[in-house]
Amino acid sequence: MMLEKNSKQPLYIQLMTELRNKIESGYYAAGDKIPTEADLEKTYGVSRITIRKTIEELCRLGYLEKQQGKGTFVKAPKICRKIEMRKSQSFSKTCMNANVQAESHVLETEIIPADKGKREFLNLEEGDRVIYIKRLMLADQIPIIQEELYLSEKIFSGFDVSRLENGSLFETLMQDLKLNEPPVGVSKIEAVNASMELGQVLKINTGDAVLKMTTYWSDTEGNPLYIGYENIVGNRYRITI
């Protein structure tokens, strides 16, 4: 297809969308070599600079990878998270199993009043507060998940949020609460479209499909611990149930 040169959308964005659709649909499968820059230039009628910018961006986002002297290839999905009988792997463990480098960065944190839904699950009273934490999770420097956590201030009074900077939440909770087993959760997953703000954080386009997973976490005896919301870039992450 020819790109719309009179469109308000930049040509490299149009070309990125076209190539991403072909990758996600399986037209270009994992491991396939994509056409050369010269072939893409001829097919889409755009400059070599536009082609190179598009390929560089798709490489940065994890769709493609360059192999010296061989060309550019579709990068295979790396990360698969297993959820089984209310047990879920931590992001750190998932990345370790996939042989990729996990990162986590705290974006925001504050103590806020708990709304009715959070009070009901966390067994809080009106006026009680929760610790709100927003994090960005990356694998090999590619954004995968924006996470929002709500922890009971009663249970986690004095919690040092800085420990979650490149740290495992599960391991931190197990240490602090002296748990013998990782937390267990009940999850709900739905597909949503990325807002402009979320797109900027996850390095995706506004309106792109995102998996939103809401999980209510407890210890193995059923005592509520926290609520987590994960906005997951679906084409960079697989969930196996």
Image (spheres, rainbow, N blue to C red):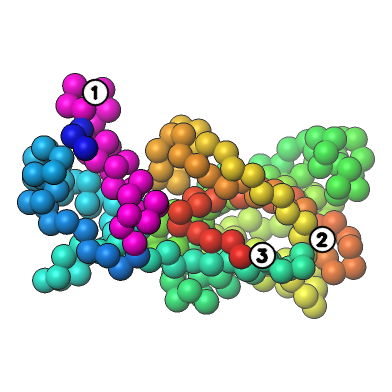
- Seen in the picture, residue 219 relative to 125 is either above or below; the reply is below
Which label is found at residue 241? 3
Residue occupied by mark 1? 7
> Residue at position x 83%, y 65% from top?
219
Mark 2, residue position = 218
Which amino acid lies under the numbered mark 2 shown in the image of this protein? Ser
- Identify which residue, 193 or 92, lies in the foreground: 193
**Of the image marks 1 and 3, the number of the one nearer the N terminus:** 1
Task: Locate residue 30 relative to residue 201 in the image: left or right.
Answer: left
Q: Give the range drawn in magenta.
A: 4-29
Give the CA separation, mark 2 to mark 1. 50 Å
Quadrant for residue 10, please give it: top left
Q: Which residue is drawn at 39% across and 51% down?
A: 25
Q: Position of residue 156 (x, y in %)?
A: 78, 56
Under circle 1, the secondary element is: loop
Image quadrant where one finds the N terminus: top left
Q: Amino acid type of disc 1?
A: Ser
Q: Circles 1 and 3: CB distance less than 8 Å?
A: no
Provide the secondary structure element on which disc 3 rests. loop
To which quarter of the image does residue 180 belong? bottom right
- On the image, the x and y values in percent for residue 93 come to 58, 73
As measured in the structure, the alpha-carbon distance from the residue carrying label 2 to the one carrying label 3 is 19 Å
Residue visible at 53% across and 44% down in the picture: 210
Residue type at tag 3: Ile
Question: Residue 73: which quarter of the image?
Answer: bottom left
